[in-house]
Amino acid sequence: MKKTLSVTVYNESGVLTRVSTVFSSRGFNLESIAVGPTENLGISRIIIVLSGNNQTIEQITKQLNKLIQVREVK
């Protein structure tokens, strides 16, 4: 089952690397990832498409929320 996550982050150097490391260190595969600025200065949005069941998505969401640079995960 494919799911889409919208991750709002502070626009800092290395934030994309930190987010992608959460996936690779746990062996999860990304289908697609895209990053773009928001209307707020200093804030970016990362859209991630991945395959997995609800338990996998919940675990990834918890791990992403632990990152300091992450503001919100939907």
Image: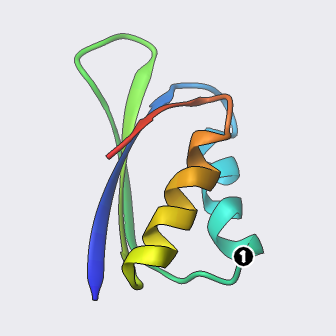
Quadrant location of the N terminus in the rendered image: bottom left
x then y, percent, for residue 47: 33, 54
Can you tell which quarter of the image residue 70 is in? top right
Q: Give the side of residue 35 with respect to residue 63, left or right.
A: left
| Residue at the (69%, 49%) spot, across then down | 18
33 vs 2, nearest the viewer: 2
Q: Looking at the image, is 36 positioned above or below residue 43?
A: below
x then y, percent, for residue 46: 39, 47
x then y, percent, for residue 17: 67, 52
x then y, percent, for residue 8: 40, 34
Q: Looking at the image, is 16 positioned above or below residue 28?
A: above
Amino acid type, label 1: Arg
Pointer 1 residue: 26
| Residue at the (67%, 31%) spot, across then down | 13
Q: Give the side of residue 72 with respect to residue 6, left or right.
A: right
3 vs 31, nearest the viewer: 3
Residue furthest front in the image: 55
Q: Give the side of residue 27 with respect to residue 4, left or right.
A: right
| Residue at the (68%, 29%) spot, across then down | 68
Is disc 1 placed on a helix, strand or loop? loop
Residue furthest bottom in the image: 1
